Amino acid sequence: MKQSVNILGALCGLTLILTACQKSEEPPVSGGPGTQPATETGKKADALIADAGVIKGKVFFEGTLPEPQEIKLDTGCMAAHGNQKMFDESLIVNGDKTLKNCFVYIKSGLSETYATPQEAFQLDQKGCRYEPRVFGVMVGQTIEIKNSDPLLHNVRGATKINNAFNLMQPQQGQVDKRAFDKPEIMVEFKCDVHPWMKSWCGVLTHPYFAVTGEEGAFEIGNVPPGKYTIEVWHETLGRQSQEVEVAPNGSAELKFVYNQK
Amino acid sequence: MKNGLLKHEEPPNGARESQGLKENPKLRWFAVFTAAATVFLIAAGASVTSTGSGDAVPDWPLSFGRLHPPQMVGGVFYEHGHRMVAGVVAALIAIQAVWLWRVEPRAWVRRLGWIALISVILQAVLGGLRVLVVSQESLQEYAMRMAGVNHVEPVRIGIGVLHALLAQIVLSMTFIIALALSPGWLRHRPPKLALPKSALKWAAFFVVALVIQLLVGGIMRHSGAGLIIPDFPLSHGKVVPPFNALPYDENAAIPMTYSELVFKTAMNFAHRTWAYVIAIGFIANMIWLARSGRKALGSVYTYSHVLAGLVFVQFFLGATTVWTERNVWVSVFHVATGATLFGFTVVYWFWCRRLRLEASPQAAVSPRTLEAHV
């Protein structure tokens, strides 16, 4: 109840400052919160660790494969996509029944703190689809979001923990920068103009993550010896986790299976 | 007394004539068109929510920095289209307000014209806030701080629900203005039978019941709970959903807390349960009036049938929304029919109120009381 009253109060206040908050036209390249240079505290993400091991494995799909759903493109997107048909990418099963676009990461077991990488991550909108579909960044790491299409997009960060955002990118070649200040699994990037356009971003405090590709494989290297919980996330199939122990200079193998009846 | 209806003692003494009311067919048709356009605006708004296009245009009042966006495709078509329709309806309501101010002798109708205009402007600002609270960082931070929340989502839902609710209030005002200018209202003569007090009480109940239903429906819609109960008429295969054992996937890709699931399920269940109450109420009201006074009650009798018909269609559309897994156009029709039902219910309440005023002994001796309301 108190929260509702607060929200109503906020609305009244918002009305008053509305005009003051209007932005002028976006420059081709613009920054956002957290896009200032990364802090140097903590261990560098790419610093080699003595006795480090590796966690690798594959993610499999079992069950009946759904029919690929064709996306109805408007003429602009059809041209931008090279006049090719486009299919829904929310569930891509490779030829060997492995799964593409799974985000794999160390969920727990790490004790070190890690410095934010200086280099920005590149997220592109090309042919009315996001490239890549699934990716990971560290907290505070800049994401450069580019519109390579000759048509307009909006980029909405549909967050649950971090601040939400919604950018307009009407110009080809426009780049906007964003960063997240809290860990979150996963942030959804959406284009509300073209509702099939989605990308998912894992935001972590450490660099130990990977995304499965054409062979459904993942490899997380430079892992300090220890016991960890590894979680796999898939946008339609959900989450799974396993415990793993990494020996000094050792290699731990994992196999994840999503069973869909 | 006949079947619970009081025999009308005496007609009121010439209230209409004393106000010098004349029919103005041009203004009347303009008002009807404005009311119909407002229903269309609500349908356009529903198409924005149903297609998930509410954030397709991140700026406001411009669209991608222009009056007209460079491309009218996908979500931009729905969102900017909604803004265009809203602009037209706001212009219609503004013209109507000025027109009423110039020619309408009844103060309350003139006043309502201005209130409708102020409300539609406020409505546009709320729509803009709904967009900007996500896209403007400073505004988002301010809103979260003011609301005492740590994410913008509850604020966004709150503004969305207020926007939806105010839309219905604007709509009801356009309906009342159209009613006040209609020949039926202006040429009205008190019926032979007086309307019982309880009919007015029931009419007021229907208005309040629909406001509650619109509020719950708005919360359900804007929080994405429309299909949280996937079956109908049962709920998760039961009459009452098992709130302590709802199908919950803790490993879902997009996580939801159990309390969030319970809240959404409760909203959904409240919306469908209340729909039964409203539907039964409207149908019982129609039967009661038909048995009691029949056509002697004039417009009230007709409207009770219109409302019962609309509530039947609305109930069917609600069920079809679930059965079609929220088909966009079924959802849009559901919202538009709900708005029309609300508008006509307010009109019905107005009629009941008038008939009761005419039936009261005070009205017979003092035409002023009636003048202020008709």
Image: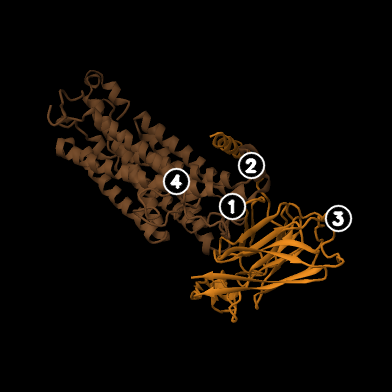
Chain colours: A orange, B brown
Q: In the image, B41: left or right of B183?
A: right
Q: Which mark is residue B62?
A: 1
Percent across and percent down for residue A111 are 79, 55
For residue B321, above or below residue B123: below
Chain letter of the residue beneath label 2 in the structure image: B
- Front disc: 4 or 2: 4
Same chain check for tags 4 and 2: yes
Q: CA distance from mark 4 to mark 2?
A: 24 Å
Percent across and percent down for residue B373 are 31, 28
- Front disc: 4 or 1: 4
* Quadrant of the rendered image containing residue A209: bottom right
Q: Which mark is residue B144?
A: 2
Q: CA distance from mark 4 to mark 1?
A: 34 Å
Q: Which mark is residue B267?
A: 4
Q: Which mark is residue B112?
A: none
Residue shown at the point (25%, 35%) measured from the top left: B186
Choose the circle earlier in sequence order: 2 or 1.
1
Q: Which amino acid, by three-letter code, is at mark 2?
A: Met
Q: CA distance from mark 3 to mark 1?
A: 41 Å
- Front disc: 2 or 3: 3
